[in-house]
Image: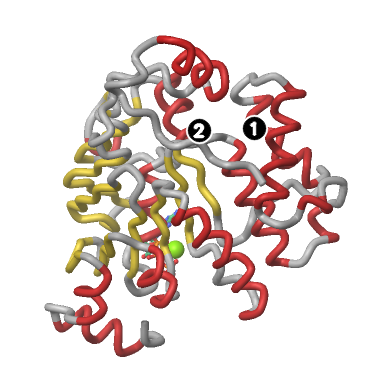
Amino acid sequence: MLVYPTEPDSLTLQSGPIHALLRGRRGLWEDLHVSATTPVIEIRDLHKSYGELEVLKGVDLVAERGHVVALIGSSGSGKSTLLRCANLLEDSQQGEIVFEGEPIAWRGAGLNRHPANRAQVTRIRTNLSMVFQQFNLWAHMTILENVMEAPVTVMGRDKAEVEQAARGYLAKVGIGDKCDGYPAQLSGGQQQRAAIARALCMEPRALLFDEPTSALDPELEQEVIKVIKDLASEGRTMIIVTHDMRLAADVSEHVVFLHQGKVEEEGPPDRVFGNPQTDRLRQFLSATAPA
Ligand SMILES: Nc1ncnc2c1ncn2[C@@H]1O[C@H](COP(=O)(O)OP(=O)(O)OP(=O)(O)O)[C@@H](O)[C@H]1O
Ligand SMILES: [Mg+2]
């Protein structure tokens, strides 16, 4: 099983052979000025509209390094939109998105606001790897090819090295024997685990999950939940949108309850689930399965 390296300590890895090794291995740790306490993602006062419809109405969210944030809320509250804005799949009209202390550069304003720097967008998007509800695997590629695709074509990494890593990640999520299969030959739970291996193979700084288990039968769901729990216990930074309150309570350090495009309440899971402060959260929790 591959062991994910722990995050570098900026004070001790400025130079020397370990630093060189890490640079060679991941190519992502050049910016060692980023302190271990800098949040991986910081979203401040984010506003997002689709035409007339304002979906995010000034949202703040912080994902600390090594923490899991669970994002909960009713259907239509803006959870997926927030994740998609965070990794720049969607434009937003106001507010800041800061990745490891680096603010996104914008040009224009309001509905004409777009990221100003393509290279920054690619770098940040590849560092915030998304796992979707509907796995989104390429049907015409084998599982191994699916996992290798982005690191080789988008990131330009060495093919042999990526293949070795991809096989390792597929083994890690328990489907090392499916490398040569096609998505249609796998169960839903196996396809979702392949999608998680694909996200891991980007060697991202954070994983963003959008309801990773809700398309699965309960039995298959457990296979995926186990993988997510393993990743959380490795200290990976993750934001997980989920309707599974038990999963949210089990894996997260911080729970954010989104209601109609605003953060209505947030806090540690024991408080959010055990002692909700607002009527809206109480209503939401009573309408979902108990944590
Ligand atoms: N591409 C789009 N164009 C127009 N409106 C959209 C678009 N995507 C989402 N919306 C609207 O934005 C609002 C928030 O949608 P979003 O998908 O973020 O909700 P959600 O909290 O993820 O819901 P669910 O739990 O059902 O996945 C909804 O009213 C939705 O109809
Ligand atoms: Mg959604």
Residue located farthest toward the bottom when viewing the structure as drawn: 286
In-front residue for pair 240/138: 240
In-front residue for pair 127/97: 127
Residue located farthest toward the top when viewing the structure as drawn: 16
Q: Position of residue 288 (x, y in %)?
A: 38, 85
User: Where in the image, quadrant-wise, is ligand 2 located?
Assistant: bottom left
In-front residue for pair 48/167: 167
Q: Residue 75 falls in which quadrant of the image? A: bottom left
Whether residue 119 sits left or right of residue 133 in the image: it is: left
The residue sitting at 43% across, 68% down in the picture is 242
The residue sitting at 19% across, 80% down in the picture is 280
Disc 2 residue type?
Thr
Whether residue 255 sits left or right of residue 166 in the image: it is: left
Q: In the rendered structure, are the residues bearing label 1 and label 2 in contact, judged by CB atoms less than 8 Å apart? A: yes
Asked which secondary structure carries label 1, the reply is helix
Q: Earlier in the sequence, mark 1 or mark 2?
A: 2
Q: Which residue corresponds to mark 2?
A: 126
The residue sitting at 44% across, 71% down in the picture is 247
Asked which secondary structure carries label 2, the reply is helix
In this view, 198 is above or below 73? above
Q: Which residue corresponds to mark 1?
A: 150
Disc 1 residue type?
Ala
Q: Which mark is residue 269?
A: none
